[in-house]
Amino acid sequence: MKKSEELNEKITVVVPIYNALEEVKLLLDSLKENFNFYLGETILINDCSKQDTTDFLNKFAKDNTQFILVNNEENLGFIKTCNKGMKMAKGDIVVLLNSDTIIPKEFCERIIKCFNSDSKIGTASPISSFSGQNYIPLRENMSIEDMNNLLRLKHKCIYPRLSSAEGFCYCIRKSVIETQGYLDEIYGKGYCEEVDFSQRASVNGWKNVLIDDLYVYHKRCCSFGKKKRTEQMKKNNDIYNSRYAVWRCINIPADTMDIIKKEMFPPKRIFSVRNEYNNSQQHKIISILGIKIKIRVK
């Protein structure tokens, strides 16, 4: 992104936190390093975590005054905690960021650039290392910055349409919240609430898109645990399907993520043959597992 590019919008990042202290520490380190506080604010909401997490967050906020810390007096659950943060948000774009994520450089800038590209974009989410749909696993011996740099080098960003932005890093235009309200608390502790919100946004004429020049690390299942997650997802899927069973989703083409993956990591050819001409003499160049064999053709 060019330094001269003007970014007028502001971002509010809301991070609901419930235990998972080691993952929280990694996220906060990345926010300290990579969040552009000139472009917004970060609100941490501690949803009655265990004492070690609570103590750490209180000290962290005292030492890092650029962060806003809110301690819930009772456990509200993920959705109510998100809504609480959304009501506090001052930014033009609200980002609900899971506590088991790690953000890269230009996090704010890439999100703002996406929303600036089309005034009808209502919700958006980046590519993840692990999520329900739009993910590319973090490659061995590559950092999150390496993945972002490679993505931006090899792939031309187009912001493809989604049926729903994904909840691990759920970016919402503030005016969408103002017109249709907050996350539906019928979904309890969480899951499906972002899909429901995106469905309402679509009905109201907004677009849900993929921020396909931003890669965010996501570990997944750190606060709930796999068993509770499975139970909660089944319950909430039933609620969602009872509402939107006949809704036809707008999805990116099935091969879109495959194309991006191949752009970043082209498959290695095991065998190839090409012709080469030099001083009117023809040769065949045979490549097998990277070993080249040059054969003269009579």
Image (tube, rainbow, N blue to C red):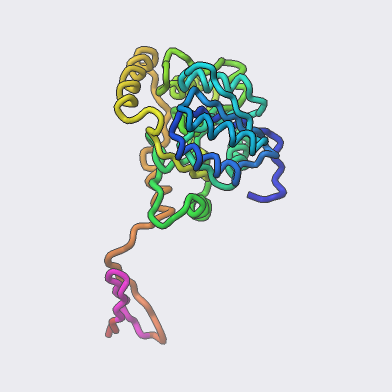
Q: Quadrant of residue 264?
A: bottom left
Q: Is residue 194 above or below residue 139?
A: above
Residue 264 visible to the viewer: yes
Say which of 102 and 111 sits in front.
102
Side of 42 relative to 278 (left or right): right
Q: Position of residue 225 (x, y in %)?
A: 34, 30
Side of 246 relative to 59 (left or right): left
The dominant secondary structure in magenta is strand
Say which of 123 and 87 sits in front.
87
Say which of 202 and 279 sits in front.
202
Quadrant of the snapshot with the C terminus: bottom left
Residue occupying image coordinates x 58% and y 47%: 105
The count of marks equals 0
Is residue 288 inside the magenta stretch?
yes
Q: Position of residue 1 (x, y in %)?
A: 63, 49
Residue occupying image coordinates x 33% and y 61%: 268
Is residue 196 inside the magenta stretch?
no
Say which of 214 and 273 sits in front.
214
Residue 199 visible to the viewer: no
Which residues lie in the magenta part? Answer: 281-294
Q: Is residue 27 above or below residue 283?
A: above
Q: Position of residue 210 (x, y in %)?
A: 49, 37
Q: Position of residue 207 (x, y in %)?
A: 53, 28
Side of 25 relative to 232 (left or right): right
Residue occupying image coordinates x 29% and y 27%: 227
Q: Is residue 286 above or below residue 120?
A: below
